[in-house]
Image (cartoon, coloured by chain):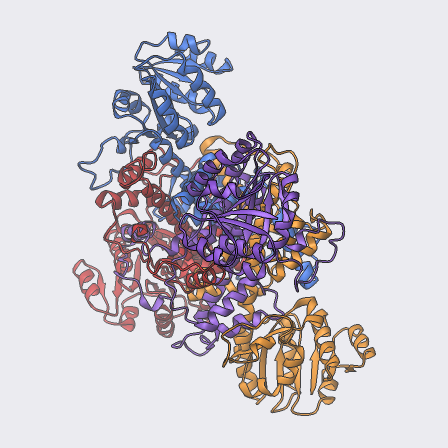
Chain colours: A blue, B red, C purple, D orange
Amino acid sequence: MQLGVVGLGRMGSNIARRLHRAGHQCVIYNRSPEPVAQLAAEGLIPAADLPSLIKKLDPPRAVWMMLPAGAVTEDVIHALSGILSAGDILIDGGNSFYKDDIRRAKVLGGKLITYIDIGTSGGIWGLERGYCMMIGGAKAAVEYLDPIFKALAPGLGAIARTPGREGRDPRAEQGYIHAGPAGAGHFVKMIHNGIEYGLMQAYAEGFDILRGKAGPGLAEGERFGLDLADIAEVWRRGSVISSWLLDLSAMALAEDPSLSKFIGAVQDSGEGRWTIDAAVEEGVPANVLAASLFERFRSREEHSYGDKLLSAMRAKFGGHVESASKNPALDR
Amino acid sequence: MQLGVVGLGRMGSNIARRLHRAGHQCVIYNRSPEPVAQLAAEGLIPAADLPSLIKKLDPPRAVWMMLPAGAVTEDVIHALSGILSAGDILIDGGNSFYKDDIRRAKVLGGKLITYIDIGTSGGIWGLERGYCMMIGGAKAAVEYLDPIFKALAPGLGAIARTPGREGRDPRAEQGYIHAGPAGAGHFVKMIHNGIEYGLMQAYAEGFDILRGKAGPGLAEGERFGLDLADIAEVWRRGSVISSWLLDLSAMALAEDPSLSKFIGAVQDSGEGRWTIDAAVEEGVPANVLAASLFERFRSREEHSYGDKLLSAMRAKFGGHVESASKNPALDR
Amino acid sequence: MQLGVVGLGRMGSNIARRLHRAGHQCVIYNRSPEPVAQLAAEGLIPAADLPSLIKKLDPPRAVWMMLPAGAVTEDVIHALSGILSAGDILIDGGNSFYKDDIRRAKVLGGKLITYIDIGTSGGIWGLERGYCMMIGGAKAAVEYLDPIFKALAPGLGAIARTPGREGRDPRAEQGYIHAGPAGAGHFVKMIHNGIEYGLMQAYAEGFDILRGKAGPGLAEGERFGLDLADIAEVWRRGSVISSWLLDLSAMALAEDPSLSKFIGAVQDSGEGRWTIDAAVEEGVPANVLAASLFERFRSREEHSYGDKLLSAMRAKFGGHVESASKNPALDR
Amino acid sequence: MQLGVVGLGRMGSNIARRLHRAGHQCVIYNRSPEPVAQLAAEGLIPAADLPSLIKKLDPPRAVWMMLPAGAVTEDVIHALSGILSAGDILIDGGNSFYKDDIRRAKVLGGKLITYIDIGTSGGIWGLERGYCMMIGGAKAAVEYLDPIFKALAPGLGAIARTPGREGRDPRAEQGYIHAGPAGAGHFVKMIHNGIEYGLMQAYAEGFDILRGKAGPGLAEGERFGLDLADIAEVWRRGSVISSWLLDLSAMALAEDPSLSKFIGAVQDSGEGRWTIDAAVEEGVPANVLAASLFERFRSREEHSYGDKLLSAMRAKFGGHVESASKNPALDR
């Protein structure tokens, strides 16, 4: 079928490309023209602006936005809501906040435009592996778009089927679900990312402790000369903690076990933060997810005002004078 | 080759069984006779006690203990150290504390007996999937036992090879490593379990928050009627957080999304605790691993003295009288 | 001077009472009539409803609301905004969210009514000890109300003066500050409560660990027969951790070291939650404040869905069957 | 009465000085001679070495060691145990590990020497304020030494008495307790320090969030121009979170609200670590105390290997390239 795709960053381009390769017709637009030209050369249909993209689609139209969450997405929704028609479908495949989805679905619904929110996971691997999709919005539109989802999803692949799923929604094991009404898709994706932070931090802390026994200069029994690349690799095989994130860690450690090209200042995106807000709102304890987010905050600071206040208190009660510089020996 | 196996619980029995099926000769002993009889019926060689097990093995002997860590393992080592000969190899495949390994290796080394510590992961799936093994101890003995490890390990299987591993130890991608000297095997396994706690807790918190949007009785925008079994399933396909623990979660949730047969009192074993001790000893921050352990402690208490003290303080400064009972509506 | 007081709960009644005793004239109103009658008997001026309260005050009027945050406060502001006049001052002394203050100040400012937000600490002890006040809003109104603040604040009292405060705002050491523009008062109070949770949880965890060495039935070296009431008392004298919360803990423990009249289900209020939201919004790590909030959530649950999922995973990978009930021996 | 004091650092010197001023006779020794000479000039009795110190004391002797925990204390105990006589008392007033106390008390008990462990709090303020003491060891010796404890303790002072303590041990409100048998004193002091870390971290996080609203360059409603020195001061008066640590914070912030002379690398001592070990050993959740310790570890690292692994995973799954340097704007 036919789909408009707006926003051709790494994710948007590959989504359009994967759909095109599966035989769907993609009309594409991007603010900067380079990715449009690139994909046009591969046979996708370029549009010069939003109105011409809309004109090139047959009603009822479906347009997939793959844009930075927040103001950019909001602006494009505003622009499209003026040129789309009753019966059209507007899809936000980015990382929007689920409460924004609920609001937008209501507003667009007033114009009989259906708003669909899709949490899309897969990163730069999605073109090849397919995308895991968590979809929110009206049932009819989700079913209408099913060929698109089927083409984007990974499908069963080589992954073993879960026993006991007879009678359950078969889409889940193809790699996409209709999670619920508007907002549900991004809510599930938000929690997905919250969990992702937690999993990553668990590996990070484990390897950090391992590294303490890896290095030279330790007494007997204190150092084991551990090979972190081999440890990551062996855990991929038959261990309880095998995962895709471990696969990626094994790749990175095989390239350079010292990880020296990374400075160690880790970004976070909205979903990790909103997950904690959701936990607080629901009254659910989430120590691990919160600590994972906080470590990312911490990683981007060299010095913290809070730590200085600790030193100030110590100086006041004990006369402790904290050493004037960080210990380079501790720089891991 | 030939191996003695002492301790035929679920793990020990299946290790012996997998070796036997691979053509190795296993002499087996267990304190209670049932599993010995069971495996003897499958063709393994039974022994009535430790001395007769030793007698049935040709020197240099190799004996694999698969016993509860602590006093039980210690007692059997003591007994075996009296009847093993110079050149023999004693393997502890259980979950011993790595500092115990270092001590034991020294003591047994004085009798020219080689002590090997192996962290073994795989659980009840190991018979079929193979066991991931992290091995500590002297190089010569580890190489001598290689046919045993090869037979127990999962091998390459269907798991993609990690790019960039050319020139690295090929055993890692077969599912076993020689981690380092005595203690190194159990140290790496200890961290494995520490990470395992963290990964599990990350999923647990995420699904707990999801569940807040799953149930009935919430206002519009507050509930999504989420299907947790389908969510676990879809994340197995193409998402960033796919893992074996997620596969298992998907199985459990497909059986019963309410998980009502579980009371929610979670045990912990030594490794999770020792991981925190190691982090503290090394001075490595480990908020996620610690919080994961603490939640297990907390799960086994209905009421905490600390919480009562919070209520007592609140009563004293604000006159707050905490409700006399837990809120059943909050009972998740 | 003259002040209207709306909302005569424990805090509101005592604020009015303390002002009356200091010679100020208080016109009082409360939805239910009992506290009005009670205070009228003490000489304060009763009002039957909001309009009559307004009528009994001379312009420019000042009205202090001491109401539950959220809908109740919002409703009364709405009602008062219709009957107050340009030049009047409306004070919210409750625990409102600081972003609500910013919005309200703007709206009321349009009618030339000044909105003042005051974070008020002191609990049931305030009548006697005085109230610590963190004030947000326009400078002129804050200065106009100074006699009210002076009367409510604790003053210097027996507390030693902080060296080095020469030249700084003298109000701080009297127990009140003009923190900043609208919202600043409740923002500072919010963080005050966030810190309060953290302090309380630190004591709670410490006494919980102490208690592990207090009880009978432990081996030598494992039990010390600690007297928790005496420990709390001794720490009040010359130790680094003396505090008012410790004073209150010492009182509670002197009454009953087992704290058996408390069930251990601890409530939380908005400020603790908003503190975490603010930390997340600012990107500031706040592991201790978050963990303190999460423990309150946890204290109100007997069983957690997350813990059940941990058990379910353990059952799937290791065949572990978690015991069917909590261990009463662990019930602290 | 008479007391030997060994170890004249800041704490040891002031303890001897306070005892001398109270009329007790102190025989003093220190490895480096300067503090001995200093105190001799004030009238205390110098000793040139341990044997001469012993000789100058009348039996039964009491010797108070105030030395760095670990090897130094262990060595002096070894030396003294050879020259003390049956009936003598050896006091460790430092910060030893409580399990070391239990062992030492047993060994010295074999020579009829009584070992007393005292956790001593008060820091550089103790000379003036007195010392809070938590004492472990045999009852008879603790009672024999009572005049010493009475002289060192703060006494009732201006601190209000706790209601309901009638019939309880009167020593607690003088500022010292006999906590229990050998080890109990240092165990209670260890938890004291664990709590101290938690309290300090709660303030540190709170002020760190406040600071986010203090600075320039924020949008309206995002900045309040908060004065952190005044906030600390106002909380000292009538608020729920007043404490001695807040008093000290108020002093430090009055001197310099930017705390710019502190680098923010915070040391930790054994007690904070042992507290976590004790929590793990007892199975008591201690998220706040652990997070407080971990932040100190983290404060001493510029870059963490764990954080680099997070960046490496992000690069692998999303092609994210983490910025090559820390954001100086985030440097708080």
Q: Quadrant of the N terminus of chain B?
A: bottom left
Apparent side of residue D107 relative to residue B101 in the rendered image (left or right): right
Percent of width and height locating residue B97: 43, 63
Percent of width and height locating residue D244: 62, 62
Residue B107 placement (x, y as % from top left): 46, 71
- Can residue B165 be seen here? The reply is no
How many dots with numbers? 0
Residue D92 visible in the shown view: yes
Query: Left of D115 or right of it: where is B179?
Result: left
Question: Residue placed farthest to the right in the image?
Answer: D41
Question: Residue at position x 62%, y 80% from top?
Answer: D91
- Quadrant of the rendered image containing residue B16: bottom left
> Residue B196 location in percent, x, y?
39, 50
Between B295 and D237, the one nearer to me in the picture: D237
Determine the residue positioned at 38% across, 46% down.
B205
On screen, residue A77 versus residue C135, left or right, reads left
Residue at screen point 38% across, 7% down: A55
